[in-house]
């Protein structure tokens, strides 16, 4: 018999409103002996069914909704969810591209599972005990739906510890290469699936890189460039590109990616980007296009204030280095910094810098990283293309 949990009024209302999580303090009662990651029935205080989902008493997000319906959650059910996810990607990932996100966790109705494609390699992140306990089934399903040559688990995220899981990296199927070349927007890029950021690359900026490419001309600055995917996308339109990052290995990859695409006008500087922007502003350097794609400065509610200071500083410096009519492409991947608040930071930076700003485009993560309307946590990447006057 399936285990049952009882959820307090506040949590039940949230779940019925479409949000997929209930928290530890909202769990009123649990059937005896429920293991971490088990699928349970969730009921309200009156005993009426709310839905079914993963339960884990060890973590703050104690219940993750899978479905509101009283239906078997078995291999066939999950196969159907994967088919729906694959159908979306077949429409939104360009036919010539060989990299993209195939499964985006809760936003695809599969809580805790991330799957990214790098050519014939799949890189997965299993972020919850529920997915982890059925990992062999998921490997089989991924092979069935996507026919990869290899599957790598990049489970080296600290968030796994919140679920009582260990951090690890291991091959789940086939022989995983040390490096692989993928195609994005007709360009070629090296990916290190074992050690690259996230699952190997920042795939969520694909569509924003295409958008930025349309504004590339003259002298371009790519700050926090990582492996240079923005810089390479802008390579055909720009006269010269300067790529900045604090990671020497990342800059080596920039040079490899430039060479791979026949670009000889991308220069790299290993530097603290904050220090460089400050010095360049004081030296009155000028660029026609500046790209800001920093790491998350506000990774939690407790770091919001310091994160805002960081975002304001880099945007202020960038605006001061642009001529009248110059373009700023600025991003934040901090979920805790909302779109409204990020715009307020940009506005404050413009005021302090004595500049006027036109919003040309409001953008977000690519469509292969869908946003679930009732799950605001799935909307994390904000990107604005601005014209500075």
Image (spheres, helix red, strand yellow):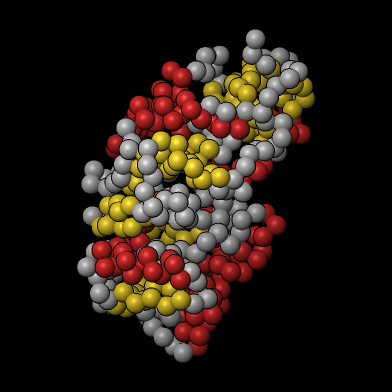
| Total residue callouts | 0
Q: Up-down: is 42 above or below 276?
A: above
Q: Nearer the viewer, residue 294 or 305?
A: 294
Q: Nearest the camera: 113 or 285?
A: 113
Instruction: Locate residue 3 relative to residue 216 in the image: left or right.
Output: right
Q: Position of residue 90 (x, y in %)?
A: 29, 36
Residue at 36% across / 30% down in the picture? 143
Q: Residue at x 67, y 63 (%)?
A: 305
Q: Nearer the viewer, residue 343 or 371?
A: 371
Residue 376 appears in which quarter of the rendering? top right
In the visual, does 226 lie left or right of 112? left
Quarter of the rendering occupied by the N terminus:
top right
Residue 7 image offset from top left, x and y in percent: 72, 25
In this picture, is 313 found above or below 308? below
What is the residue that sits farthest to the top in this orientation? 1
Res 102 seen here? no
Nearer-the-camera pick, 253 or 314: 253
Q: Residue 205 at x, y = what percent? A: 40, 54
* The image quarter in which residue 41 lies: top right
At 30% from the left edge and 52% from the top edge, which residue is drawn? 182
Q: Residue furthest front?
A: 175
Tell me where residue 346 appears, x and y as whole percent: 52, 67
Image quadrant occupied by the C terminus: bottom left
Q: Is residue 336 above or below residue 329?
A: above
The answer to whether residue 91 of the structure is visible from this angle is yes
């Amino acid at each position: 018999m399936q285990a049952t949990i009882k959820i307090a009024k506040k949590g039940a209302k949230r779940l019925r409103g479409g949000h997929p999580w209930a928290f530890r303090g909202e769990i009123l009662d649990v059937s005896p002996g429920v293991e971490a990651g088990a699928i349970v029935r969730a009921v309200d205080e009156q005993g009426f069914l709310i839905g079914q989902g993963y339960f884990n008493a060890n973590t703050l997000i104690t219940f993750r909704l899978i479905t509101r319906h009283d239906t078997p959650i078995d291999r066939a059910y999950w196969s159907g969810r994967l088919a729906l996810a694959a159908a979306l990607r077949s429409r939104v990932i360009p036919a010539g591209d060989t990299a993209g996100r195939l499964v985006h966790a809760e936003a695809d109705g599969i809580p805790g599972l991330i799957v990214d494609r790098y050519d014939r390699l799949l890189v997965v992140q299993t972020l919850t005990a529920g997915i982890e306990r059925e990992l062999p089934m998921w490997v089989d399903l991924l092979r069935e739906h996507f026919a990869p040559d290899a599957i790598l688990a990049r489970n080296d995220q600290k968030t796994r510890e919140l679920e009582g899981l260990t951090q690890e990296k291991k091959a789940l199927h086939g022989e995983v290469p040390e490096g692989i070349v993928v195609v994005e927007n007709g360009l070629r890029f090296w990916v290190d699936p074992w050690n690259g950021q996230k699952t190997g690359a920042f795939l969520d900026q694909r569509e924003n890189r295409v958008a930025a490419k349309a504004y590339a001309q003259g002298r371009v600055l790519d700050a926090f460039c990582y492996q240079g995917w923005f810089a390479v996308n802008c390579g055909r339109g720009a006269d010269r590109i300067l790529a900045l990052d604090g990671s020497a290995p990342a800059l080596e990859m920039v040079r490899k990616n430039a060479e791979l695409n026949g670009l000889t006008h991308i220069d790299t500087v290993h530097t603290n980007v904050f220090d460089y922007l400050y010095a360049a502003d004081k030296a009155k350097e000028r660029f026609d296009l500046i790209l800001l794609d920093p790491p998350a400065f506000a990774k939690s509610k407790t770091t919001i204030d310091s994160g805002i200071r960081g975002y304001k500083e880099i945007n202020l410096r960038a605006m001061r280095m642009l001529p009248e009519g110059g373009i700023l492409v600025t991003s934040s991947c901090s979920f805790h910094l909302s779109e409204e608040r990020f715009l307020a930071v940009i506005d404050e930076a413009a005021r302090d810098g004595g500049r006027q700003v036109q919003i040309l485009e409001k953008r977000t993560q690519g469509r292969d990283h869908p946003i679930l309307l009732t799950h605001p946590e799935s909307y994390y990447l904000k990107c604005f293309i601005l014209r500075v006057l």
